[in-house]
Image (spheres, helix red, strand yellow):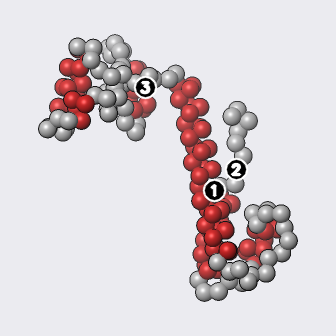
Amino acid sequence: MEACWNWAVLYEMLEEIEHVGQVVLSHPAKNRIIAESMHKNDRFDAHALATLLRGDFISRVHVPARDVREKKNNMRQCLWLVRMRTMVRNRIHSLIDRHPRLERPAFKDVFCNQGIHWMRTVALPGNERAMLDAELPRFRLHRFRLPKSF
């Protein structure tokens, strides 16, 4: 089968079937015969993969052990949360920085507890207040600690 977004689920299901001898994961970009074929459907792709596999011409993808895949998935989730937190923080900074005359109390970081309290109560013109109110819960959602296993 080709490596795709849900390859691990399919791979594990196929591995559990008793009569399946070996599951081979192919690299879709490196198996050019499928990418360049005129007929694009699963039946033709499966036939082409089987032909490549029979001749041992298939470009294989390394499949890490299940525990390694789980660790990678955990890491991907943490990286996604960090990216989301950074995006929300940047949006909040941008919103506040549009008001240079805004009186800002002295705190170490606008995202410390005092800073968040200030952001909840600060008066902003127009719909800027509503925008900030929409972003603050997202920031709180993404405040997390990485598990100690990382």
How far from the left and from the top, in percent, is residue 128? 61, 80
Q: Name the residue type under label 3.
A: Glu
Quarter of the image that includes the N terminus: top left
> What number is the disc on residue 12?
3
- Determine contact: label 1, label 2, CB under 8 Å: yes
- Find the distance from the CA under tag 3 to the CA under tag 2: 31 Å
| Residue at mark 1 | 85
Q: Secondary structure at mark 2?
A: loop
Q: Name the residue type under label 1.
A: Arg
Q: Earlier in the sequence, mark 1 or mark 3?
A: 3
Q: Residues within 10 Å of mark 1 (few under 14, many from 20)?
A: some
Residue beneath the point at 65% across and 68% down:
92
Residue beneath the point at 28% across and 28% down:
31
How far from the left and from the top, in percent, is residue 33? 21, 29
Q: Earlier in the sequence, mark 3 or mark 2?
A: 3
Q: Is residue 19 above or below residue 126?
A: above
| Residue at mark 2 | 144
